[in-house]
Amino acid sequence: MAISNRTIVGLKVLVHAACLAPVAWLLWRMVENNLGPDPTATVTFFTGRGTLRLLVLSLAITPVRRLIPQLAWIIRFRRMLGLYAFFYGCLHLLTYVGLYAGFSVAAMIDDITRRRFIVAGLVSWLLMLPLALTSTTWSIRKLGKNWARLHRLAYLSAFAGLTHYWWGVKQGVLTPVPITIVFWMLMLARPLTSWWSKRRTVRAAS
């Protein structure tokens, strides 16, 4: 299904608004001093959940595009969603560094050696870093096929983020279940939709 550039621009404006609205809401709650009994925990959970949701949403674009060729234009939103996931990830990391560790290197090193969920979260962010740095059109042209290989790190980043989530909640807490199910469905869908896309191409050629 063809879609005009004007429509794409309009949709991108909506996506920008949808991605930034939660941050505006959070800032408003902070100004109103209405973040609950533990504001730091509220900000941490909010930014961490936002990171995972946007990262997983960006990973869903390729399978959807393969499964429904008429929606091929949604590929234009994958980079935007990935960058917003990194933005939320940076906010999540800064929350930890500033509010939990108090910008103390010693405290952060101590946490890394004693708390495995901190390590998993840091690995997730570090895996997103090269993806954000190579998100430019110049990088895509310069890296060629290696760009697509590099950006498969997004799956590892999401997995590390989910691990961080599971290890960070108390035993018996099941809040990470929905996003985990969606992630593993996408992991299963990736090879299946790739096979389906190739099969459809062969049929069209014959």
Image (cartoon, grey):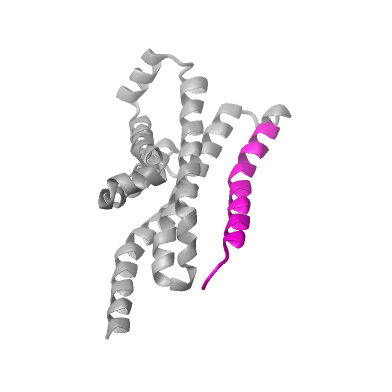
- Which residue occupies the extreme bottom position in the image? 206
Judge whether residue 15 can be spotted in this image: yes
Residue depicted at 33% across the width and 78% down the height: 200
In magenta stretch: residue 24: yes
Residue depicted at 36% across the width and 41% down the height: 134
8 relative to 108, above or below: below
Where is residue 187, by image quadrant? bottom left
Where is residue 116, by image quadrant? top left
Residue 10, position as x, y percentages in the image: 63, 56
- Closer-to-camera residue (177/108): 108
148 relative to 111, above or below: below
Residue 33, position as x, y percentages in the image: 70, 27
Span of residues in magenta: 1-29
Relative to 82, 123 lies left or right: left
In magenta stretch: residue 38: no
Mostly what secondary structure, the magenta segment?
A: helix
Judge whether residue 176 can be spotted in this image: no
